Each structure stands twice: as C-alpha cells, then as structure tokens.
Image (cartoon, rainbow, N blue to C red):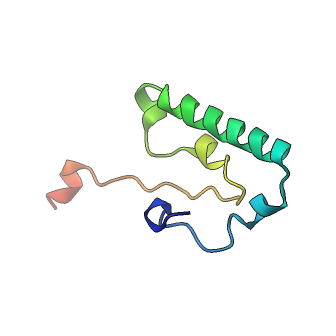
Amino acid sequence: MREQARGAGYSPGMDEDLGTLDRTALIAEVKRLRAGIRMHRDSTGHALCWHHPQLWSLLPERTDPLPTAPRTPKEHMG
C-alpha cells in the first residue's frame, strides 16, 4: 500500500488478514467494499455527514469511534 493512501488510523499489520484469503475470498471482499463505497457515494443529505459507521464496518478492525460535534458559531464567540 502506498504511504499516502494510509489514513491516520492505519497501522502496520492491519491488512495482514488479506494474505490468508484465496482468490475467491479476495474478490468477494473487493465487491463488499465497493458496494459500501457506492452506497456512501450515492447517499444524500445527512447520510453524507461525517459519522459513517456503515462504511467503517467494512474494515476488518472493529471500532466505532464516538463522533464529536464541531463547535457552533455561537460557541466560537465566547
């Protein structure tokens, strides 16, 4: 994997499970990931918001970080 393609949450070894999959399983995994990406791409409104547990669930590691809301303009003023 190219270095710039790795996100902040990436650490070496996260994708080692791919080496244990045969060709059929790898194809199924690619199709599953593509379906999730397409579902997100085709979303509208609040579904495009920054909290995406359905998209994150496509990853082998199991985590669902709690979102933090950005400050409102009123909070910025004091």
Quadrant where the image shows the N terminus = bottom right
Which residue is found at the position 23% from the left and 56% from the top?
75
Residue most extreme to the left: 77
Which residue is found at the position 29% from the left and 54% from the top?
71
Residue most extreme to the front: 23
Quadrant where the image shows the C terminus = bottom left
How many numbered dots are placed on residues in this image? 0
Which residue is found at the position 70% from the left and 37% from the top?
32
On the image, the x and y values in percent for residue 19 come to: 78, 62
Q: Compared with residue 42, is residue 49 higher up or lower down, i.e. above or below?
A: below
Q: In front here: 75 or 21?
A: 21
On the image, the x and y values in percent for residue 21 come to: 83, 54
Q: Compared with residue 17, is residue 28 higher up or lower down, i.e. above or below?
A: above
Q: In front here: 48 or 36?
A: 36
> Image quarter for residue 63?
bottom right
On the image, the x and y values in percent for residue 76 come to: 19, 58
Which residue is found at the position 76% from the left and 41% from the top?
27
Say left or right for 13 vs 55.
right
Say left or right for 67 vs 39.
left
Q: Compared with residue 6, is residue 67 higher up or lower down, i.e. above or below?
A: above
